[in-house]
Amino acid sequence: TIIVEFRKVINFGSMIAHFTRHPTGGPNTPIVWDESLEKFRVTGLTPAAFWCGYAAMVLRTCVATFVGWVGCLLLFYTKVKLDLIFNSLALVFILELDNILFAATMSVLSQNFLSDIEPIRYQQPMSKAVAKLQKSGLPVFVGVCCFTAALFMRYEQVVYCQGLLSQASALCLFGGPPPTGHPELAAPVVGLCESLLSVRCAPVVDGPGSDNGPCVISDQGVFHGPKVQFYIDGSLYPGMSDREGNRRPWIDWQDMPSDTRRTLWSSNMYQKTLRKQCVQMYHPEGQVERRRMDRDVDEVANAAPFWCNREMMFSAVFATTRRSLISKPQDSYVFGSVNLYDPHVVDAVGRCRERALVGKSKPFVTTRSPRISAVSISKWKLPHNQWRRRHFRSLATAIEAS
């Protein structure tokens, strides 16, 4: 639509230039009656008409450019296909407002007079070679430009949405309430890692399996037992550790086997990244606790031991935002771009498991529930159905609230 408008402006300007080079009538008789055609014919333009025509051409160019720019932004921020169609029709409506105003405000006599004027015939100021090239090459050129512009806008839209997703992911991963009594730690939003990894947690565990922490990854439900279950700090992903047993960066891990992955999780590349980062933030020495979900509300929920050193993570992830907060007022700061694949962020997440970075001056507050023995992961069961339903109900509430 914008290209059509620009072509109309070019044709209008060529018409004005034609009368400048080839005037056929005087300034006092710009319109004459042609008896052979039985119509009025334009033979020239008055000086006022010239200036008015050039002004109209400049204004139409500015309006078309502005509508094109606003239309690109409008389509850029449109996510729903139906809205994309409606917004495109709205752009066409804006460019047709001049015809609507003409039909609504001009008298019928004036409209009939303009419709009876013979169309102005003029020759474009170009050579035959250029005219031939325009005839055969212009449609191809315009089509390629439109297709390229559409692909570019789509690419920029995907990049923009991925940036928003990265920012939201970083806030959810490192902006949740910290463990009770440990403000030096950064923890995920309550229920985020629990739902992403499909973990099942017990309030307190002891025995031979207690070194693996209070949570396991399982598909156990309220009315059925587990078909798949893994320790979070075990060999969950192929390639997690090198030959010497040292854990590799999460970005180098391979995917889980497809049959196991389909049983536990949905297939999503963005959730896959968050799951691996949650595994890096898991601390088996911690315990499940009743954690306040937000400082503005009194609602609490069960939270698994996922955390990392706050200063280390915020320096790597939110460095741009910190500089903006320091240099600008709080109501006008810019939330900087976040790239979870940045080498500094990958290194910081990989160091989350270092216990030396986690302060332990204060004890972790845990729920007071019966202790269970973690003798083997294959025999890991919850005590009874009543406590199991209550635990799953609280965990589901935390996931829904997050």
Image (tube, helix red, strand yellow):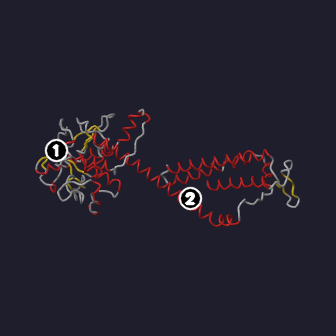
Determine contact: label 1, label 2, CB under 8 Å.
no
User: Is the C terminus in the top left, top right, bottom left or bottom right quadrant?
Assistant: top left
Residue at the location (11% across, 52% down)?
375
Query: Is residue 236 or residue 184 the one in the foreground?
Result: 184
Residue 125's x, y, as percent?
A: 72, 59
Bin the neighbour count of mark 1 within 10 Å (Cα to Cα): few under 14, some 14-19, many 20 and up. Answer: many
Q: Is residue 242 left or right of residue 258?
A: left
Answer with the quarter of the image where residue 331 lies. Answer: top left
From this viewpoint, which residue is outermost toward the right? 35
Q: Residue at horizontal 50%, vertical 50%?
A: 78
Q: Secondary structure at mark 1?
A: loop
Question: Residue 46 bears which disc, if any?
Answer: none
Amino acid type, mark 2: Cys
The amino acid sitting under disc 1 is: Val
Foreground: disc 1 or disc 2: 2
Q: Is residue 366 left or right of residue 132?
A: left
Q: Which residue is mark 1?
A: 204
Q: Where does residue 88 sit, x and y in percent of width and height? A: 57, 53
Q: Position of residue 151 (x, y in %)?
A: 50, 58
Q: Label 2's element?
A: helix
Residue shown at the point (56%, 59%) measured from the top left: 145
Looking at the image, is mark 1 or mark 2 earlier in the sequence? Answer: 2
Quadrant location of the N terminus in the rendered image: bottom right
Residue 146 tag number: 2
Q: Residues within 10 Å of mark 2 (few under 14, many from 20)?
A: few
